Image (spheres, grey):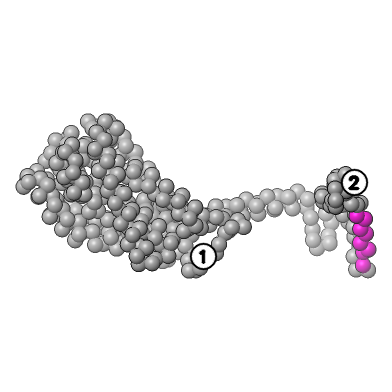
Amino acid sequence: AYVLDQSFERFSKPQGVALIILGSCPGGNISNIFCFLWNADLSLSIAMTTASSVLSFAFLTANCALYIPILTEGDDEAEIDYVSLAFSVAMVVAGICVGFTAAYFDKLWAKKVLGVFGFIATLYMIWTALFGNATGSAPIWTLPWEVWLAPLSLCTIAWILSLIISLLFRLPKKSVLTVALESANQNSVLSAAIIYLSLDEYTQEDQDLAIGIPIMYTIISCIFDGLGGLISCQLKWVNCKLPDDPDYVEPEDGDDTITLSDIIYKWKQYKESKRTNALLSDADIDYGGTSTKSKQFETIIMTKSKHTNGNSQSFNNTMDSNSNNTGTLEQASSYPNGDHSIERSSQ
């Protein structure tokens, strides 16, 4: 982040401070969301988010204390409020702990409540960031291309380094994608909070310029996450097929973490079950031998005629009922010229 700031002359001091704070922040929940969507190693992603969040107070403080004074040339207007920084990091860690607690006790109502609150909070943060930036003095679409190039370069470098390191350590391909997603997605919400607290002595315009950096980075990282997931699916690093797909491969590591494919598959099973129950309810079939709405119901089966050397063959099959079976199966012969036969099963 520091090298990129020094490489572009169009960067102002507040934007450089914002870039360094962003690059020093831990991983954010966007990586967890994309690991969930792409069937990556969600457990590893959450573990990395937790570890980086817990350690972020030390490393974020060290990086900011080292680079920001050099960048601002001793300007006292940009100072890190370490008390507020500790509080912000503590809130992130507390949220993770609440999620772990809900998962440990496995209470469905608690998971639903947390899911609803998390969804509402995410929408609120997106709306606040975009609306606040759009109505501010420096909307992101008005910034010069060099300002966009810096977050783009930062995200690209993160992807390249994480892929190289993961492949060198011979991690499973699913974990390689997870490490890349986690390393390239910074906690933009945390960085925005620290930027506001650190640049409170600057003008409102400078703050608007600075807060555009994490917004641009989030947009760019989401594009990278989508493309990286699609490429990983094509390379079969992750299994994006549903369990009922012929090409579906069972995970070898026995990971039973719920992913998007599992939810879609369970939803399809639920819909199929409702459809089957509705059909059985309409027919009012009783397999115990008692009364039914329809004394006689018919099943029509369409079977294709077989062709040999361009000529159709007809088949006449008769199945005799045994002594314990009161039903009869009458199978009509198939019609010539490739037509279909009709089998009527009467009770």
Amino acid residing under circle 1? Pro
Amino acid residing under circle 2? Pro
Q: Can residue 194 be seen in this view?
A: no
Q: Name the residue under label 1.
A: 251
Give the left or right position of residue 329, taking residue 62 as reference: right
Q: What element carries label 2?
A: loop
Q: Residue at x 9, y 50 (%)?
A: 69
Q: Which mark is residue 56?
A: none
In magenta, the rendered stretch is 315-322
Give the left or right position of residue 21, taking residue 66 as reference: right
Q: Mark 2 points at which residue?
A: 336
Give the left or right position of residue 295, taking residue 140 as reference: right
Image coords of residue 157 (percent x, y): 29, 51
The quarter of the rendered structure image containing the C terminus is bottom right
Q: Can residue 315 be seen in this view?
A: yes
How many C-alpha atoms fall within 10 Å of the one at disc 1: few (<14), some, or many (≥20)? few
Image coords of residue 75 (percent x, y): 7, 44
> In the image shown, does 225 or 97 lie closer to the viewer?
225
Image coords of residue 119 (percent x, y): 40, 47
Q: Residue at x 6, y 47 (%)?
A: 74
Mark whose residue sits in front, 2 or 1: 2
Q: Is mark 1 on a helix, strand or loop?
A: loop
